[in-house]
Image: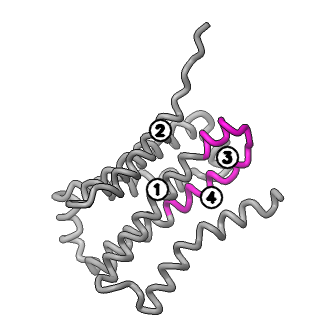
Amino acid sequence: MKSFLKPSIFTLSLIPFIIITYKIFLNKLGPEPVKEITHFTGEWTLIFICLTLSMSPLKRFTNFKFWIKIRRILGLFVFFYATLHLLTYIVIDYRLDWSQIIDDVVKKKYIFVGFTAWLLLVPLVLTSSQRMMILLKKNWNKLHKLIYVIAIFGSLHFIWLSKTIFFKPLIYSLIILLLLLLRIRFKKTI
């Protein structure tokens, strides 16, 4: 069972990538293909953030350690989909026009927080291995708490991007808020 767990989670996590690749190659992205890819990869980034944040509460409530064993894979897929999201914006949408991209990062708050969230993911990915956990010791936990900031920034990115439809971003924000609240441990008083 354990030997199939991580490969199964990895394979399931690739399904959104397979879906968007299928849509690209079969020209099924609709009238605004760049927008479709950008929104698809952005939303899957948020889904994987929610999945990653849910692993510790699930372990606490169920007392099953396998939730923690798959957290790293899910966290790496946060970076994977966030990078696809960013590359869609930089390469496909703006065609590497760095002056326009920098102008957007500086002037548009939703792009600024989205880009900042991606930058904060980089040290998490670079230190995600077991070896880095051992090397960094207690600092590893401190560093990886950046996922809370990343989750909030990802949520803000989606809210500020949505100029008229707030329902979906609000749902993600509420899920992220709930998952962050579940991490608070209340001391029992007698």
Name the amino acid, label 3. Answer: Ile
In front of the other: 118 or 138? 118
Q: Residue lying at the far bottom in this picture: please name it.
A: 26
In front of the other: 24 or 107? 24
Give the number of the mark in front: 4 or 2.
2
The residue carrying mark 1 is: 122
The residue carrying mark 3 is: 68
Instruction: Name the N-terminal-most of marks 3 and 1.
Output: 3
The residue carrying mark 4 is: 73
Instruction: Name the N-terminal-most of marks 3 and 2.
Output: 3
Q: CA distance from mark 3 to mark 2?
A: 16 Å
Q: CA distance from mark 4 to mark 2?
A: 20 Å
Name the amino acid, label 4. Answer: Ile
Q: Is residue 7 left or right of residue 161?
A: right
In front of the other: 168 or 27? 168
Give the structural element (helix, strand or loop) at label 1. Answer: helix
Q: CA distance from mark 1 to mark 4?
A: 15 Å
Q: Residue lying at the far top in this picture: please name it.
A: 190
